[in-house]
Image: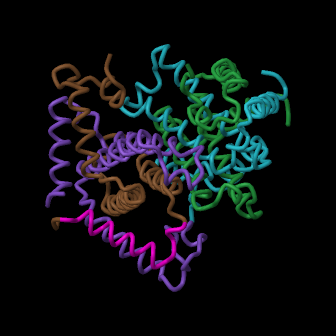
Chain colours: A cyan, B green, C purple, D brown
Amino acid sequence: MSGDSIEQLDRRLQRFARERDWEQFHSPKNLSMALIAECAELVEHFQWLSQEQSYRLPPDKHDAVAMELADIFIYLVRCAERLDIDLIEAANRKIGINERRYPAQRVRGDARRAGEYDNPVE
Amino acid sequence: MSGDSIEQLDRRLQRFARERDWEQFHSPKNLSMALIAECAELVEHFQWLSQEQSYRLPPDKHDAVAMELADIFIYLVRCAERLDIDLIEAANRKIGINERRYPAQRVRGDARRAGEYDNPVE
Amino acid sequence: MSGDSIEQLDRRLQRFARERDWEQFHSPKNLSMALIAECAELVEHFQWLSQEQSYRLPPDKHDAVAMELADIFIYLVRCAERLDIDLIEAANRKIGINERRYPAQRVRGDARRAGEYDNPVE
Amino acid sequence: MSGDSIEQLDRRLQRFARERDWEQFHSPKNLSMALIAECAELVEHFQWLSQEQSYRLPPDKHDAVAMELADIFIYLVRCAERLDIDLIEAANRKIGINERRYPAQRVRGDARRAGEYDNPVE
Protein backbone atom coordinates (compact mmCIF):
# COMPACT_ATOMS: atom_id res chain seq x y z
CA MET A 1 0.00 0.00 0.00
CA SER A 2 1.55 3.28 -1.04
CA GLY A 3 2.30 6.21 1.21
CA ASP A 4 -0.63 8.45 0.50
CA SER A 5 -3.29 5.92 -0.37
CA ILE A 6 -6.29 7.78 1.04
CA GLU A 7 -5.22 11.02 -0.63
CA GLN A 8 -4.84 9.22 -3.96
CA LEU A 9 -8.26 7.66 -3.52
CA ASP A 10 -9.72 11.02 -2.58
CA ARG A 11 -8.31 12.71 -5.69
CA ARG A 12 -9.51 9.88 -7.92
CA LEU A 13 -13.02 10.20 -6.47
CA GLN A 14 -13.06 13.96 -6.90
CA ARG A 15 -12.07 13.58 -10.53
CA PHE A 16 -14.71 10.88 -11.01
CA ALA A 17 -17.46 13.14 -9.64
CA ARG A 18 -16.32 16.24 -11.54
CA GLU A 19 -16.07 14.47 -14.89
CA ARG A 20 -19.70 13.38 -14.47
CA ASP A 21 -20.89 16.72 -13.03
CA TRP A 22 -22.10 14.81 -10.00
CA GLU A 23 -20.58 17.12 -7.39
CA GLN A 24 -23.87 19.04 -7.41
CA PHE A 25 -25.53 15.98 -5.82
CA HIS A 26 -22.76 15.34 -3.31
CA SER A 27 -23.81 17.54 -0.40
CA PRO A 28 -22.82 16.15 3.01
CA LYS A 29 -26.52 15.51 3.66
CA ASN A 30 -26.92 13.44 0.50
CA LEU A 31 -23.62 11.64 0.99
CA SER A 32 -24.65 10.61 4.52
CA MET A 33 -27.71 8.97 2.95
CA ALA A 34 -25.65 7.19 0.28
CA LEU A 35 -23.23 6.05 2.98
CA ILE A 36 -25.89 4.49 5.17
CA ALA A 37 -27.54 2.86 2.16
CA GLU A 38 -24.24 1.14 1.37
CA CYS A 39 -23.85 0.05 5.01
CA ALA A 40 -27.27 -1.53 4.82
CA GLU A 41 -26.17 -3.60 1.84
CA LEU A 42 -23.37 -4.92 4.04
CA VAL A 43 -25.81 -5.65 6.88
CA GLU A 44 -28.05 -7.49 4.43
CA HIS A 45 -25.29 -9.99 3.69
CA PHE A 46 -25.10 -10.89 7.37
CA GLN A 47 -28.71 -10.61 8.52
CA TRP A 48 -29.64 -14.30 8.51
CA LEU A 49 -26.18 -15.69 9.26
CA SER A 50 -24.94 -16.80 12.66
CA GLN A 51 -21.93 -14.95 14.02
CA GLU A 52 -19.78 -17.97 13.20
CA GLN A 53 -21.02 -18.04 9.62
CA SER A 54 -20.23 -14.36 9.23
CA TYR A 55 -16.51 -15.19 9.61
CA ARG A 56 -16.51 -17.98 7.03
CA LEU A 57 -18.00 -16.52 3.87
CA PRO A 58 -17.84 -18.51 0.64
CA PRO A 59 -15.51 -16.85 -1.93
CA ASP A 60 -18.21 -15.18 -4.03
CA LYS A 61 -19.93 -13.75 -0.96
CA HIS A 62 -16.55 -12.66 0.47
CA ASP A 63 -15.91 -10.78 -2.73
CA ALA A 64 -19.37 -9.17 -2.70
CA VAL A 65 -18.76 -8.08 0.90
CA ALA A 66 -15.39 -6.59 -0.11
CA MET A 67 -17.20 -4.50 -2.73
CA GLU A 68 -19.71 -3.30 -0.09
CA LEU A 69 -16.85 -2.26 2.21
CA ALA A 70 -15.36 -0.47 -0.79
CA ASP A 71 -18.61 1.44 -1.39
CA ILE A 72 -18.78 2.46 2.27
CA PHE A 73 -15.16 3.60 2.18
CA ILE A 74 -15.74 5.55 -1.04
CA TYR A 75 -18.67 7.52 0.36
CA LEU A 76 -16.88 8.01 3.68
CA VAL A 77 -13.87 9.54 1.89
CA ARG A 78 -16.20 11.71 -0.24
CA CYS A 79 -18.09 12.93 2.82
CA ALA A 80 -14.86 13.74 4.67
CA GLU A 81 -13.58 15.64 1.63
CA ARG A 82 -16.72 17.78 1.34
CA LEU A 83 -16.45 18.69 5.01
CA ASP A 84 -12.66 19.09 4.99
CA ILE A 85 -12.14 16.43 7.66
CA ASP A 86 -8.93 14.35 7.89
CA LEU A 87 -10.16 10.78 8.47
CA ILE A 88 -6.91 9.39 9.85
CA GLU A 89 -6.48 12.30 12.25
CA ALA A 90 -10.11 12.12 13.38
CA ALA A 91 -9.94 8.34 13.91
CA ASN A 92 -6.76 8.58 15.98
CA ARG A 93 -8.29 11.37 18.07
CA LYS A 94 -11.40 9.25 18.68
CA ILE A 95 -9.38 6.17 19.66
CA GLY A 96 -7.51 8.31 22.16
CA ILE A 97 -10.85 9.35 23.65
CA ASN A 98 -12.01 5.72 23.78
CA GLU A 99 -8.79 4.58 25.42
CA ARG A 100 -9.36 7.04 28.26
CA ARG A 101 -13.09 6.35 28.42
CA TYR A 102 -12.77 2.56 28.62
CA PRO A 103 -9.75 1.68 30.77
CA ALA A 104 -8.82 -1.92 29.93
CA GLN A 105 -8.80 -3.15 33.51
CA ARG A 106 -12.29 -1.77 34.08
CA VAL A 107 -14.24 -2.99 31.06
CA ARG A 108 -12.43 -6.23 30.22
CA GLY A 109 -14.74 -8.76 28.56
CA ASP A 110 -17.81 -6.75 29.47
CA ALA A 111 -20.30 -6.75 26.61
CA ARG A 112 -22.41 -4.16 28.32
CA ARG A 113 -19.56 -1.74 28.26
CA ALA A 114 -18.72 -2.71 24.70
CA GLY A 115 -22.36 -2.14 23.90
CA GLU A 116 -22.17 1.33 25.35
CA TYR A 117 -18.96 2.06 23.52
CA ASP A 118 -20.01 5.66 22.95
CA ASN A 119 -21.47 6.47 26.29
CA PRO A 120 -19.25 7.76 29.04
CA VAL A 121 -18.76 5.31 31.90
CA GLU A 122 -19.79 7.53 34.74
CA MET B 1 -0.25 11.78 7.06
CA SER B 2 2.28 9.00 7.38
CA GLY B 3 2.90 6.25 4.87
CA ASP B 4 1.03 3.41 6.43
CA SER B 5 -1.74 5.27 8.22
CA ILE B 6 -4.49 2.69 7.82
CA GLU B 7 -2.19 -0.13 8.91
CA GLN B 8 -1.18 1.84 11.99
CA LEU B 9 -4.81 2.53 12.77
CA ASP B 10 -5.67 -1.11 12.23
CA ARG B 11 -2.94 -2.29 14.62
CA ARG B 12 -3.99 0.26 17.25
CA LEU B 13 -7.60 -0.94 17.02
CA GLN B 14 -6.59 -4.58 17.28
CA ARG B 15 -4.59 -3.83 20.40
CA PHE B 16 -7.48 -1.81 21.83
CA ALA B 17 -9.92 -4.71 21.36
CA ARG B 18 -7.51 -7.36 22.65
CA GLU B 19 -6.59 -5.46 25.79
CA ARG B 20 -10.30 -5.27 26.65
CA ASP B 21 -11.09 -8.85 25.55
CA TRP B 22 -13.66 -7.40 23.16
CA GLU B 23 -12.59 -9.40 20.11
CA GLN B 24 -15.14 -12.03 21.14
CA PHE B 25 -17.90 -9.50 20.31
CA HIS B 26 -16.34 -8.33 17.04
CA SER B 27 -17.77 -10.82 14.57
CA PRO B 28 -18.31 -9.40 11.08
CA LYS B 29 -22.06 -9.66 11.73
CA ASN B 30 -21.86 -7.61 14.93
CA LEU B 31 -19.42 -5.11 13.43
CA SER B 32 -21.77 -4.49 10.49
CA MET B 33 -24.44 -3.55 13.05
CA ALA B 34 -22.08 -1.24 14.94
CA LEU B 35 -21.04 0.33 11.64
CA ILE B 36 -24.56 1.15 10.52
CA ALA B 37 -25.45 2.45 13.98
CA GLU B 38 -22.58 4.93 13.70
CA CYS B 39 -23.68 5.92 10.19
CA ALA B 40 -27.11 6.66 11.57
CA GLU B 41 -25.61 9.06 14.10
CA LEU B 42 -24.08 10.90 11.15
CA VAL B 43 -27.42 10.94 9.32
CA GLU B 44 -29.08 12.29 12.45
CA HIS B 45 -26.89 15.40 12.34
CA PHE B 46 -28.15 16.18 8.84
CA GLN B 47 -31.77 15.03 8.92
CA TRP B 48 -33.48 18.39 9.42
CA LEU B 49 -30.88 20.50 7.60
CA SER B 50 -31.14 21.73 4.04
CA GLN B 51 -28.40 20.59 1.68
CA GLU B 52 -26.87 24.07 1.86
CA GLN B 53 -26.84 24.00 5.65
CA SER B 54 -25.13 20.61 5.60
CA TYR B 55 -22.05 22.26 4.05
CA ARG B 56 -21.84 25.07 6.60
CA LEU B 57 -21.83 23.43 10.00
CA PRO B 58 -21.07 25.54 13.08
CA PRO B 59 -17.71 24.56 14.66
CA ASP B 60 -19.10 22.40 17.48
CA LYS B 61 -21.34 20.48 15.09
CA HIS B 62 -18.48 20.15 12.58
CA ASP B 63 -16.38 18.59 15.31
CA ALA B 64 -19.17 16.24 16.35
CA VAL B 65 -19.56 15.17 12.72
CA ALA B 66 -15.79 14.56 12.49
CA MET B 67 -16.09 12.21 15.48
CA GLU B 68 -18.98 10.36 13.76
CA LEU B 69 -16.89 9.92 10.61
CA ALA B 70 -14.11 8.64 12.88
CA ASP B 71 -16.43 6.05 14.44
CA ILE B 72 -17.55 4.87 11.00
CA PHE B 73 -13.95 4.62 9.83
CA ILE B 74 -12.96 2.72 12.98
CA TYR B 75 -15.65 0.06 12.55
CA LEU B 76 -14.99 -0.13 8.82
CA VAL B 77 -11.30 -0.84 9.44
CA ARG B 78 -12.23 -3.41 12.14
CA CYS B 79 -14.66 -5.16 9.83
CA ALA B 80 -12.14 -5.26 6.99
CA GLU B 81 -9.52 -6.69 9.36
CA ARG B 82 -11.80 -9.49 10.58
CA LEU B 83 -12.54 -10.46 6.99
CA ASP B 84 -8.97 -9.96 5.75
CA ILE B 85 -10.00 -7.36 3.16
CA ASP B 86 -7.63 -4.59 1.98
CA LEU B 87 -9.79 -1.44 1.97
CA ILE B 88 -7.60 0.62 -0.36
CA GLU B 89 -7.30 -2.20 -2.88
CA ALA B 90 -11.05 -2.93 -2.73
CA ALA B 91 -11.95 0.76 -3.15
CA ASN B 92 -9.67 1.18 -6.16
CA ARG B 93 -11.11 -1.95 -7.72
CA LYS B 94 -14.64 -0.66 -7.18
CA ILE B 95 -13.86 2.77 -8.64
CA GLY B 96 -12.47 1.03 -11.73
CA ILE B 97 -15.77 -0.83 -12.07
CA ASN B 98 -17.72 2.43 -11.66
CA GLU B 99 -15.58 4.22 -14.23
CA ARG B 100 -16.47 1.59 -16.81
CA ARG B 101 -20.10 1.38 -15.71
CA TYR B 102 -20.74 5.12 -15.85
CA PRO B 103 -18.90 6.61 -18.84
CA ALA B 104 -18.64 10.35 -18.21
CA GLN B 105 -20.09 11.41 -21.54
CA ARG B 106 -23.14 9.23 -20.98
CA VAL B 107 -24.20 10.07 -17.44
CA ARG B 108 -23.05 13.68 -17.11
CA GLY B 109 -25.19 15.67 -14.68
CA ASP B 110 -27.84 12.96 -14.60
CA ALA B 111 -29.14 12.53 -11.07
CA ARG B 112 -31.04 9.44 -12.08
CA ARG B 113 -27.83 7.75 -13.05
CA ALA B 114 -26.13 9.07 -9.94
CA GLY B 115 -29.06 7.69 -8.02
CA GLU B 116 -28.54 4.32 -9.60
CA TYR B 117 -24.83 4.42 -8.96
CA ASP B 118 -24.76 0.70 -8.27
CA ASN B 119 -26.98 -0.55 -11.01
CA PRO B 120 -25.65 -1.33 -14.42
CA VAL B 121 -26.63 1.28 -17.02
CA GLU B 122 -27.65 -0.42 -20.26
CA MET C 1 -59.40 -0.39 6.83
CA SER C 2 -60.81 -3.06 9.07
CA GLY C 3 -60.92 -2.97 12.84
CA ASP C 4 -57.99 -5.17 13.71
CA SER C 5 -55.73 -4.54 10.75
CA ILE C 6 -52.38 -4.83 12.51
CA GLU C 7 -53.45 -8.03 14.27
CA GLN C 8 -54.58 -9.51 10.97
CA LEU C 9 -51.28 -8.52 9.37
CA ASP C 10 -49.38 -9.97 12.31
CA ARG C 11 -51.17 -13.30 12.07
CA ARG C 12 -50.65 -13.46 8.32
CA LEU C 13 -46.92 -12.82 8.80
CA GLN C 14 -46.63 -15.46 11.51
CA ARG C 15 -48.28 -18.00 9.24
CA PHE C 16 -46.02 -16.96 6.35
CA ALA C 17 -42.88 -17.50 8.46
CA ARG C 18 -44.05 -20.78 9.97
CA GLU C 19 -45.05 -22.32 6.66
CA ARG C 20 -41.51 -21.65 5.39
CA ASP C 21 -39.81 -22.67 8.65
CA TRP C 22 -38.25 -19.21 8.72
CA GLU C 23 -39.06 -18.43 12.36
CA GLN C 24 -35.67 -19.91 13.26
CA PHE C 25 -34.04 -16.94 11.49
CA HIS C 26 -36.36 -14.33 12.96
CA SER C 27 -34.61 -13.46 16.22
CA PRO C 28 -35.08 -9.85 17.31
CA LYS C 29 -31.39 -9.29 16.52
CA ASN C 30 -31.76 -10.56 12.96
CA LEU C 31 -35.06 -8.76 12.42
CA SER C 32 -33.51 -5.45 13.50
CA MET C 33 -30.94 -5.96 10.74
CA ALA C 34 -33.59 -6.80 8.14
CA LEU C 35 -35.57 -3.76 9.26
CA ILE C 36 -32.72 -1.31 8.84
CA ALA C 37 -31.77 -2.85 5.49
CA GLU C 38 -35.30 -2.12 4.26
CA CYS C 39 -35.13 1.43 5.61
CA ALA C 40 -31.95 1.94 3.65
CA GLU C 41 -33.75 0.95 0.45
CA LEU C 42 -36.21 3.74 1.21
CA VAL C 43 -33.38 6.20 1.85
CA GLU C 44 -31.79 5.19 -1.43
CA HIS C 45 -34.86 6.37 -3.35
CA PHE C 46 -34.47 9.84 -1.86
CA GLN C 47 -30.71 10.26 -1.61
CA TRP C 48 -30.11 12.40 -4.71
CA LEU C 49 -33.50 14.14 -4.72
CA SER C 50 -34.20 17.61 -3.37
CA GLN C 51 -36.74 17.82 -0.58
CA GLU C 52 -39.28 19.21 -3.06
CA GLN C 53 -38.69 16.32 -5.45
CA SER C 54 -39.22 13.85 -2.62
CA TYR C 55 -42.85 14.98 -2.39
CA ARG C 56 -43.57 14.64 -6.10
CA LEU C 57 -42.53 11.13 -7.08
CA PRO C 58 -43.47 9.82 -10.51
CA PRO C 59 -46.05 6.98 -10.31
CA ASP C 60 -43.64 4.06 -10.72
CA LYS C 61 -41.29 5.47 -8.09
CA HIS C 62 -44.23 6.23 -5.78
CA ASP C 63 -45.26 2.62 -6.06
CA ALA C 64 -41.73 1.36 -5.40
CA VAL C 65 -41.58 3.59 -2.31
CA ALA C 66 -44.94 2.19 -1.13
CA MET C 67 -43.44 -1.31 -1.35
CA GLU C 68 -40.41 -0.18 0.71
CA LEU C 69 -42.70 1.25 3.39
CA ALA C 70 -44.54 -2.07 3.32
CA ASP C 71 -41.30 -3.99 3.88
CA ILE C 72 -40.38 -1.75 6.81
CA PHE C 73 -43.84 -2.19 8.31
CA ILE C 74 -43.68 -5.97 7.84
CA TYR C 75 -40.38 -6.32 9.70
CA LEU C 76 -41.51 -3.86 12.36
CA VAL C 77 -44.64 -5.92 13.04
CA ARG C 78 -42.55 -9.13 13.09
CA CYS C 79 -40.05 -7.64 15.51
CA ALA C 80 -42.81 -6.38 17.82
CA GLU C 81 -44.43 -9.81 17.75
CA ARG C 82 -41.22 -11.63 18.69
CA LEU C 83 -40.74 -9.26 21.64
CA ASP C 84 -44.42 -9.18 22.61
CA ILE C 85 -44.69 -5.42 22.18
CA ASP C 86 -47.98 -3.68 21.24
CA LEU C 87 -46.98 -1.16 18.56
CA ILE C 88 -50.05 1.06 18.85
CA GLU C 89 -49.80 1.22 22.64
CA ALA C 90 -46.05 1.89 22.52
CA ALA C 91 -46.46 4.63 19.90
CA ASN C 92 -49.18 6.39 21.87
CA ARG C 93 -47.07 6.20 25.00
CA LYS C 94 -44.09 7.70 23.13
CA ILE C 95 -46.17 10.52 21.63
CA GLY C 96 -47.37 11.36 25.13
CA ILE C 97 -43.74 11.62 26.24
CA ASN C 98 -42.91 13.82 23.25
CA GLU C 99 -45.89 16.09 23.89
CA ARG C 100 -44.60 16.77 27.39
CA ARG C 101 -40.99 17.00 26.28
CA TYR C 102 -41.63 19.48 23.47
CA PRO C 103 -44.28 21.96 24.56
CA ALA C 104 -45.65 23.59 21.39
CA GLN C 105 -45.17 27.17 22.54
CA ARG C 106 -41.53 26.48 23.35
CA VAL C 107 -40.24 24.67 20.27
CA ARG C 108 -42.44 26.12 17.52
CA GLY C 109 -40.70 26.15 14.16
CA ASP C 110 -37.35 25.38 15.72
CA ALA C 111 -35.42 22.91 13.61
CA ARG C 112 -32.82 22.50 16.29
CA ARG C 113 -35.44 21.21 18.65
CA ALA C 114 -36.93 19.08 15.92
CA GLY C 115 -33.45 17.80 15.26
CA GLU C 116 -33.10 16.83 18.89
CA TYR C 117 -36.48 15.22 18.97
CA ASP C 118 -35.23 12.50 21.28
CA ASN C 119 -33.16 14.52 23.64
CA PRO C 120 -34.75 16.09 26.67
CA VAL C 121 -34.92 19.88 26.52
CA GLU C 122 -33.19 20.72 29.75
CA MET D 1 -56.96 -1.91 20.35
CA SER D 2 -59.61 0.21 18.73
CA GLY D 3 -60.85 -0.08 15.20
CA ASP D 4 -58.98 2.71 13.55
CA SER D 5 -55.79 2.74 15.56
CA ILE D 6 -53.38 3.74 12.81
CA GLU D 7 -55.69 6.52 11.63
CA GLN D 8 -55.95 7.84 15.17
CA LEU D 9 -52.19 7.71 15.54
CA ASP D 10 -51.77 9.43 12.20
CA ARG D 11 -54.11 12.27 13.15
CA ARG D 12 -52.41 12.70 16.52
CA LEU D 13 -49.02 12.92 14.80
CA GLN D 14 -50.28 15.44 12.25
CA ARG D 15 -51.63 17.63 15.04
CA PHE D 16 -48.36 17.26 16.96
CA ALA D 17 -46.30 18.43 13.97
CA ARG D 18 -48.67 21.28 13.06
CA GLU D 19 -48.85 22.69 16.56
CA ARG D 20 -45.05 22.93 16.56
CA ASP D 21 -44.80 24.15 12.96
CA TRP D 22 -42.57 21.15 12.24
CA GLU D 23 -44.33 20.07 9.06
CA GLN D 24 -41.89 22.28 7.14
CA PHE D 25 -39.10 19.84 8.14
CA HIS D 26 -41.09 16.69 7.42
CA SER D 27 -40.37 16.13 3.74
CA PRO D 28 -40.33 12.46 2.72
CA LYS D 29 -36.56 12.79 2.23
CA ASN D 30 -36.00 14.09 5.76
CA LEU D 31 -38.43 11.61 7.29
CA SER D 32 -36.60 8.70 5.63
CA MET D 33 -33.44 9.91 7.40
CA ALA D 34 -35.21 10.21 10.75
CA LEU D 35 -36.69 6.75 10.24
CA ILE D 36 -33.36 5.07 9.60
CA ALA D 37 -31.75 6.91 12.49
CA GLU D 38 -34.41 5.43 14.80
CA CYS D 39 -33.86 1.96 13.33
CA ALA D 40 -30.18 2.28 14.11
CA GLU D 41 -30.99 2.95 17.76
CA LEU D 42 -32.85 -0.37 17.74
CA VAL D 43 -29.90 -2.13 16.09
CA GLU D 44 -27.59 -0.64 18.70
CA HIS D 45 -29.49 -2.42 21.47
CA PHE D 46 -28.82 -5.77 19.80
CA GLN D 47 -25.36 -5.32 18.29
CA TRP D 48 -23.29 -7.13 20.93
CA LEU D 49 -25.98 -9.61 21.99
CA SER D 50 -26.26 -13.20 20.83
CA GLN D 51 -29.47 -14.11 19.03
CA GLU D 52 -30.64 -15.94 22.15
CA GLN D 53 -29.99 -12.91 24.33
CA SER D 54 -31.97 -10.73 21.94
CA TYR D 55 -35.12 -12.68 22.88
CA ARG D 56 -34.62 -12.36 26.63
CA LEU D 57 -34.15 -8.69 27.34
CA PRO D 58 -34.17 -7.49 30.94
CA PRO D 59 -37.26 -5.34 31.71
CA ASP D 60 -35.59 -1.93 31.43
CA LYS D 61 -33.99 -2.85 28.11
CA HIS D 62 -37.27 -4.36 26.88
CA ASP D 63 -38.97 -1.08 27.64
CA ALA D 64 -36.25 0.93 25.89
CA VAL D 65 -36.62 -1.32 22.84
CA ALA D 66 -40.41 -0.79 22.90
CA MET D 67 -39.78 2.97 22.75
CA GLU D 68 -37.43 2.49 19.76
CA LEU D 69 -40.08 0.45 17.93
CA ALA D 70 -42.51 3.27 18.76
CA ASP D 71 -40.19 5.87 17.23
CA ILE D 72 -39.79 3.78 14.08
CA PHE D 73 -43.56 3.33 13.83
CA ILE D 74 -44.14 7.06 14.36
CA TYR D 75 -41.82 8.10 11.53
CA LEU D 76 -43.15 5.33 9.31
CA VAL D 77 -46.73 6.59 9.77
CA ARG D 78 -45.57 10.19 9.16
CA CYS D 79 -43.74 9.22 5.99
CA ALA D 80 -46.74 7.26 4.68
CA GLU D 81 -49.00 10.23 5.42
CA ARG D 82 -46.81 12.69 3.53
CA LEU D 83 -46.79 10.40 0.52
CA ASP D 84 -50.47 9.42 0.81
CA ILE D 85 -49.69 5.71 1.16
CA ASP D 86 -51.97 3.30 3.07
CA LEU D 87 -49.59 1.20 5.16
CA ILE D 88 -51.97 -1.69 5.81
CA GLU D 89 -52.96 -1.94 2.16
CA ALA D 90 -49.34 -1.72 1.00
CA ALA D 91 -48.20 -4.37 3.50
CA ASN D 92 -50.93 -6.79 2.46
CA ARG D 93 -50.08 -6.24 -1.19
CA LYS D 94 -46.40 -6.92 -0.47
CA ILE D 95 -47.14 -10.09 1.51
CA GLY D 96 -49.18 -11.32 -1.43
CA ILE D 97 -46.18 -10.76 -3.68
CA ASN D 98 -43.91 -12.59 -1.23
CA GLU D 99 -46.31 -15.52 -0.96
CA ARG D 100 -46.13 -16.01 -4.71
CA ARG D 101 -42.39 -15.33 -4.87
CA TYR D 102 -41.46 -17.80 -2.13
CA PRO D 103 -43.66 -20.88 -2.38
CA ALA D 104 -43.49 -22.65 1.00
CA GLN D 105 -42.56 -26.04 -0.41
CA ARG D 106 -39.67 -24.54 -2.34
CA VAL D 107 -37.92 -22.37 0.22
CA ARG D 108 -38.67 -24.19 3.46
CA GLY D 109 -35.95 -23.68 6.07
CA ASP D 110 -33.61 -22.19 3.49
CA ALA D 111 -31.75 -19.25 4.97
CA ARG D 112 -30.37 -18.29 1.60
CA ARG D 113 -33.86 -17.76 0.30
CA ALA D 114 -34.86 -16.02 3.48
CA GLY D 115 -31.78 -13.89 3.01
CA GLU D 116 -32.89 -12.98 -0.47
CA TYR D 117 -36.39 -12.19 0.69
CA ASP D 118 -36.62 -9.32 -1.75
CA ASN D 119 -34.99 -10.80 -4.77
CA PRO D 120 -36.94 -12.84 -7.24
CA VAL D 121 -36.01 -16.51 -7.24
CA GLU D 122 -34.52 -17.71 -10.51
Q: Give residue D81's quadrant in the image.
A: bottom left
Residue B83 painted magenta: no
Can residue C38 be seen here?
yes
- Decide which of D95, A24 is in the foreground and name it: A24
Q: Give residue B122's quadrant in the image.
A: top right
- Provide residue C92's location: percent of width, then percent of height: 30, 70
In the orientation shown, which residue stands out farthest toward the top?
A: A59
- Provide residue C58's location: percent of width, then percent of height: 46, 44
In the image, C46: left or right of C1?
Answer: right
Q: Vertically, is B73 above or below C10?
A: above
- Decide which of B4, A22 is in the foreground and name it: A22
- Decide which of C113, A91 is in the foreground and name it: C113
In the orientation shown, which residue stands out farthest toward the bottom?
A: C105
- Provide residue C15's location: percent of width, then percent of height: 14, 38
Residue D6 painted magenta: yes
Residue lying at 73% horizontally and 58% vertically, measured from the top left: B62
Residue lying at 75% horizontally and 42% vertically, measured from the top left: A87
Residue lying at 64% horizontally and 51% vertically, measured from the top left: A29
Most common SS among magenta residues:
helix
- Provide residue B50's location: percent of width, then percent of height: 64, 59
In the image, the segment drawn in magenta is D4-24
